[in-house]
Amino acid sequence: MSTRRQWLTRAETSADIPTIRAINRAAFETPLEADLVDALRADSSWIEGLSIVATDDDGELVGHALLTRCHIDDTPALCLAPVAVRPEYQKTGAGSAAIRAALEAAKDKGEHFVVVLGHPDYYPRFGFGRASAHGIRLTIDVPDEAVMALTLDADHQLSGGTVRYAAPFGI
């Protein structure tokens, strides 16, 4: 199943939690990565309505995207992580649909900035650009092109600083 298609998206509900766990365990190599969503759900960085699932026409959950609170120095921002799709549905647009819905939900909540540590060829399609162009940096050593940032509101400009992630990220 590698063809692109339309996916339905919605905010996570408590009934979705076991399936989200299964999606993450199927998509990530280690249990630590797979269990990150549960750890974030228990952390103060969790924001209701910013955990988005992608479903097929029958309502089966196939993908998941999550935005949680982080800070750029003292400026509140969001962190996009993780994004997971069942292996058999990868490269079908399910992850992209969940990301777009999460970004729209963040805009609707009045959020201004999102940062992501991820694959540099994937995130520019959502409007992300290199975080270093705004003076944003991390406390860990990663390739410059893998740290990206997005302004959700043209009236607010990103300012430089160091990203502080939620404790469950371990960085």
Image (cartoon, rainbow, N blue to C red):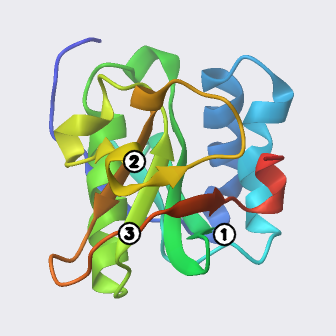
| Residue at image location 25% in from the left, 70% down from the top | 152
| Residue at image location 84% in from the left, 33% down from the top | 32
Quarter residue 109 falls in: bottom left
SS of the residue under disc 2: helix
Query: In the rendered view, would you say 57 is above or below 11?
Result: above
Foreground: 77 or 24?
77
Q: Which residue is mark 2?
A: 131
Q: In the rendering, at what x and y percent does residue 104 appear?
A: 26, 69
Foreground: 55 or 138?
138
Mark 3 vs mark 2: in front? 2
- Residue type marked 3: Phe
Q: In the rendering, at what x and y percent does residue 134 appear?
A: 35, 56
Query: How far is disc 3 from disc 2 in space, using C-alphas?
Result: 11 Å
| Residue at image location 39% in from the left, 70% down from the top | 159
Query: In the rendered view, would you say 161 is above or below 53?
Result: below
Mark 1 vs mark 3: in front? 3
Query: How far is disc 1 from disc 2 in space, using C-alphas?
Result: 34 Å
Q: Which residue is mark 1?
A: 14
Q: Which mark is residue 104?
A: none
